[in-house]
Image (spheres, grey):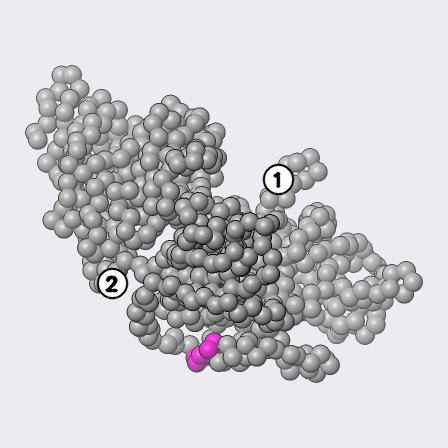
C-alpha cells in the first residue's frame, strides 16, 4: 500500500507520514490544528481497510477505545480522541518523541553494548510496571474493576523518549485482538509469542499476572541481551509452558543474585508463584535499585538515548550534549556484542577498612557548587562492595543556635534513605537529615542503618554554634558462603518431596530442597530497626477454606548474618506476643494450597517493646497467602485422621543449616497438616521435641528462608502411632 501524500487532511488532523503498519492497523505521525492556529503533534492509528468491514472487530475496537481514552498515567501514552473519518475508525494518541525499546536494544548492540546497563534496565522495568499497575487497577464509573489486561507487553510496545520517559502503548486494541477474526488474531500474534505467558501459550483465560510474566520477559531481554525463549513458534510455546529457559546469571554472571531472584519470581511458570500484581513486582525492583544504584534517575535514561541516537538527533538539528561523567561510564558498559557471554571473572574481596573515626576541621563549608549531572555507579566494585567512608566538615556560623549551648549535624549516606539514631534515640527522618540542638559539652553517638548494609556509627563532638556535615558510605553485608554448585545439585537430585506414611520409614528433609523463599513472595512486610526488640500478635480471624477459621500467621525476618536460624521464622497468634529482634525486615504471611476460597483479613500488631510504638499490618487472606510448590516442601500422605501420631524431627547425618557453612544448625521447621485440601493447623516443629498430631490426612514441612544456595544438611522425620482408632492394633514403632 503506497503511503499517503505528505500533508493529507484527515478530519481535524493532517497526516504527515506513515510510521508503521501492523497486523490490523496503520500508524501515522500527524498534526492537530486547534483554534488560533495552535498545533500539536499526535499519532493517528487507523484500522486497516481489510478489517474495516469486520463488525465484530470494529465493535471490539470501539469498546476498547472507550477504555483507552479513560487511561491517564505518566507511563501510558495518552489516547485523547476516537472517531470516524470517511468510514475509517481511528485513535488519536500522544506523540512520544523517542523510540520503542526494540529499536533501543538494536542501537545499543550497534554501539557495542550487549545489553542495557543493569540500573537503567531496572529503571525501565519499574516505570513500565507502574503503567501496567495503573491499568490493572482501573475502575469504571460504578466503582467496578475493568480488568484491563494489556496482553501484548513487548519491547515494540514500550516507548523510551529522549527525555527519559517510559511509555506503554497499544492499550487501545489489546482486547480487540480477541475479536472473531481468526486471521487478524493470527497476524497480531505473529512475532509476539516470545513474550507469551504460560497460560497465554496454553490458550487459557488471562489475568494481570500474564502481563507480569511478559514484563519479566522484557526485563530479562534488557538485562541479558537476548530472549529467554527462542526458536520456531511451536517450540517456543512449549518451552514457555515448561519454564525451560536459562537463568539470567547463566548468561551474565555480573547480574546480582537478588535481581535474578526477582526476575525468576516474575517469570514463574505457575502464576500463583509470581508477583500477585505489577505493583508488587515494581516495588521489589525499586527496593533493589535503591540499594544498588540510588543515583539513577530518568536523566540517565535521557543521556543514554542521546548517546545511542546522536546521529539521528544531529541530522534533525538537535545537537547532543552529554555530561563528562556519563561518557566516562560508557566505556565500562561496552562489552563484546557477540552471542557468547563473557566468562565470569571473580571479583576479589576488598579488605574491611578500620572503623572510621573521621576528621574535623574548622574551615568554613564552601558555597555549594552548581548541580553536577547525575552520575550513577554501575560497577559492582563501586556499588555492591563500596567501603565505608566518612567526610566531616564544620563551620563557624557566628550565631549560637537559639542561644543554647548546642551544635547541629547534617547527616547523609550512600545509599540514602537510611535510618538514624542519636545516642540511642531514633530520628523520624531518614538520610539526608538535619539533627539540631545537640549538647556541645558531651560526645554523641550517631548510628546509620539500612537493611542489607553493615551498620555505621560515629561519635561526634563539636563546639557550640557549629554544624558538622557527616556522610556515611555504607557497604553491603558480606553474604554467607554458598555451597559449591555441585554439592547443591547433588542435594536437590537426592531430595524426596513426597512419601506415604509407614511406621518404619524415616524420610529426610533436605535444607537445600524443601525451601520456601519468602522475600519475593506475596507476604506482607515492614521495615524494622535491627537494634530494637518487637512483639508480634494477631487480631481477628480468617477462613482458609477449612471448617474452622484461623487466627494464626507465619512470620519470617531478614537480618544480619549473625542472626541465628532459630530466630528467623515462627508462628504468631492472638494469645501471646512473639518476640523478634535483630530484624531489618519482617514478613508475615498465611500458608495455603489455594486462595480462591479464602475470606477475611488478619491484623498483625508489631509493638516496639522499649517505647510501645505500634505498627499494624493488614494481612489479606488472598493477597498475602503463600502457596508452596511441590518442589518447595515435603509432604507425608496417607495419615488416618482418627489416629493420633507423635511427630519427631532429628538432625540428619549432616546437620541442617540455612545460614551458610559453619552456622548454627536449624532447630525447627514449619509444619502444616489438614484433613481436606486446606490446612487445619500451622505450627513449628522443634528438633528433638515430639509433637502430637490428630485429625490429619497429610503433613507438610518446609524451611522458610531468603536464599537456598547456602543451605546444607537435613533433618530426619519420625512419625509413630501413639493412639490408634479404637479396635485397631497399634502399629510397630
Which quadrant of the figure contains the C terminus? top left
Q: Residues within 10 Å of mark 1 (few under 14, many from 20)?
A: few
Give coordinates of residue 155: x percent, y percent. Answer: 56, 65
Please report whichever mark, 2 or 1, sits nearer to the chain's N-terminal start: 1
The span picked out in magenta is: 332-338
Q: Name the residue nearer the viewer: 178 or 481.
A: 481
Q: Position of residue 617 (x, y in %)?
A: 47, 36
> Does the magenta portion include 482?
no
Residue at disc 2, secondary structure: helix
Label 2 or label 1, whichever lies nearer to me, is: 2
Q: Residue at x 45, y 31 (%)?
A: 602
Residue located farthest toward the left when viewing the structure as drawn: 732
Dot 2, how many residues are within 10 Å of its Cα: few (below 14), some (14-19), or many (20+)?
few
Does residue 397 appear in the picture of this structure? yes
Residue at x 31%, y 29% (from the top left corner):
681
Give the labeled residue for mark 1.
145
Q: Nearer the viewer, residue 27 or 349?
A: 349
Task: Name the residue beneath numbered marker 2.
Answer: 485
Amino acid at each position: 500500500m503506497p503511503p499517503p501524500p505528505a500533508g493529507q487532511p484527515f478530519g481535524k488532523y493532517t497526516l504527515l507520514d506513515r510510521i508503521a503498519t501492523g497486523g490490523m492497523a496503520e500508524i501515522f505521525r500527524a498534526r492537530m490544528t486547534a483554534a488560533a492556529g495552535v498545533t500539536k503533534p499526535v499519532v493517528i492509528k487507523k484500522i486497516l481497510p481489510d478489517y474495516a468491514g469486520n463488525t465484530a472487530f470494529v465493535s471490539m475496537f470501539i469498546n476498547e477505545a472507550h477504555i483507552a481514552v479513560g487511561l491517564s498515567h505518566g507511563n501510558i501514552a495518552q489516547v485523547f480522541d476516537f472517531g470516524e473519518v470517511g468510514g475509517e475508525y481511528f485513535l488519536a494518541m500522544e506523540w512520544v518523541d523517542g523510540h520503542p525499546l526494540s529499536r533501543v536494544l538494536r542501537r545499543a548492540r550497534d554501539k557495542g553494548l550487549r545489553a542495557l546497563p543493569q540500573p537503567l534496565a531496572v529503571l525501565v522495568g519499574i516505570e513500565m510496571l507502574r503503567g501496567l499497575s495503573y491499568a490493572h487497577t482501573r475502575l469504571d464509573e460504578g466503582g467496578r474493576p475493568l480488568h484491563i489486561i494489556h496482553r501484548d507487553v513487548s519491547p515494540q510496545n514500550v516507548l523510551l523518549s529522549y527525555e527519559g520517559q517510559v511509555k506503554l502503548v497499544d492499550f487501545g486494541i489489546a482486547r480487540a485482538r480477541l475479536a472473531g477474526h481468526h486471521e487478524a488474531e493470527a497476524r497480531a500474534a505473529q512475532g509476539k509469542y516470545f513474550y507469551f505467558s504460560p497460560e497465554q501459550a496454553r490458550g487459557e483465560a488471562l489475568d494481570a499476572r500474564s502481563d507480569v510474566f511478559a514484563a519479566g520477559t522484557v526485563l530479562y531481554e534488557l538485562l541479558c541481551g537476548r530472549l529467554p525463549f527462542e526458536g520456531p513458534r511451536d517450540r517456543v510455546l512449549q518451552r514457555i509452558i515448561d519454564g525451560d529457559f536459562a537463568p539470567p546469571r547463566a548468561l551474565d554472571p555480573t547480574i546480582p543474585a537478588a535481581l535474578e531472584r526477582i526476575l525468576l519470581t516474575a517469570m514463574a511458570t505457575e502464576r500463583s508463584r509470581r508477583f500477585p500484581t505489577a505493583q508488587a513486582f515494581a516495588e521489589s525492583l525499586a527496593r533493589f535499585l535503591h540499594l544498588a544504584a540510588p543515583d539513577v534517575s530518568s536523566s540517565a535514561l535521557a543521556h543514554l538515548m542521546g548517546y545511542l541516537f546522536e546521529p539521528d538527533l544531529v541530522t534533525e538539528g538537535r545537537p547532543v550534549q552529554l555530561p563528562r561523567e556519563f561518557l566516562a561510564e560508557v566505556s565500562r558498559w561496552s562489552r563484546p556484542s557477540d552471542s557468547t557471554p563473557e566468562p565470569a571473572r571473580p571479583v576479589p574481596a576488598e579488605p574491611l577498612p578500620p572503623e572510621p573515626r573521621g576528621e574535623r576541621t574548622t574551615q568554613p563549608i564552601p558555597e555549594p557548587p552548581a548541580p553536577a549531572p547525575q552520575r550513577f555507579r554501575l560497577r559492582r566494585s563501586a556499588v555492591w562492595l563500596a567501603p565505608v567512608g566518612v567526610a566531616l566538615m564544620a563551620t563557624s556560623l557566628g550565631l549560637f543556635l537559639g542561644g543554647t549551648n548546642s551544635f547541629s549535624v547534617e547527616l547523609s549516606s550512600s545509599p540514602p534513605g537510611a535510618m538514624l539514631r542519636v545516642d540511642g534515640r531514633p530520628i523520624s527522618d531518614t538520610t539526608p537529615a538535619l539533627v539540631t540542638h545537640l549538647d556541645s559539652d558531651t560526645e554523641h553517638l550517631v548510628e546509620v542503618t539500612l537493611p542489607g548494609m553493615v551498620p555505621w556509627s560515629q561519635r561526634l563532638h563539636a563546639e557550640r554554634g557549629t554544624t558538622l556535615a557527616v556522610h556515611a558510605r555504607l557497604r553491603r553485608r558480606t553474604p554467607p558462603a554458598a555451597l559449591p554448585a555441585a554439592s547443591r545439585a547433588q542435594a536437590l537430585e537426592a531430595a524426596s518431596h513426597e512419601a506415604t506414611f509407614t511406621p518404619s520409614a524415616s524420610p529426610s528433609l533436605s535444607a537445600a530442597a524443601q525451601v520456601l523463599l519468602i522475600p519475593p513472595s506475596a507476604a506482607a512486610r515492614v521495615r524494622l530497626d535491627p537494634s530494637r526488640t518487637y512483639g508480634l500478635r494477631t487480631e481477628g480471624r480468617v477462613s482458609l477454606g477449612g471448617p474452622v477459621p484461623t487466627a494464626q500467621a507465619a512470620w519470617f525476618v531478614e537480618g544480619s548474618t549473625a542472626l541465628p536460624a532459630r530466630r528467623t521464622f515462627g508462628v504468631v497468634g492472638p494469645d501471646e506476643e512473639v518476640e523478634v529482634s535483630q530484624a531489618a525486615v519482617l514478613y508475615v504471611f498465611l500458608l495455603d494450597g489455594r486462595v480462591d476460597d479464602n475470606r477475611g483479613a488478619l491484623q498483625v500488631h508489631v509493638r516496639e517493646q522499649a517505647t510501645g510504638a505500634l505498627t499494624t499490618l493488614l494481612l489479606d487472606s488472598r493477597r498475602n497467602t503463600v502457596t508452596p510448590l511441590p518442589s518447595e516442601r515435603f509432604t507425608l500422605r496417607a495419615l488416618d485422621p482418627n489416629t493420633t501420631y507423635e511427630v519427631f524431627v532429628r538432625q540428619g547425618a549432616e546437620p541442617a543449616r540455612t545460614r551458610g557453612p559453619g552456622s548454627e544448625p536449624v532447630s525447627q521447621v514449619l509444619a502444616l497438616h489438614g484433613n481436606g485440601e486446606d490446612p487445619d493447623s500451622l505450627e513449628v516443629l522443634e528438633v528433638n521435641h515430639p509433637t502430637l498430631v490428630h485429625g490429619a490426612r497429610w503433613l507438610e514441612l518446609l524451611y522458610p528462608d531468603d536464599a537456598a544456595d547456602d543451605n546444607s544438611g537435613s533433618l530426619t522425620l519420625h512419625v509413630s502411632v501413639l493412639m490408634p482408632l479404637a479396635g485397631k492394633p497399634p502399629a510397630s514403632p
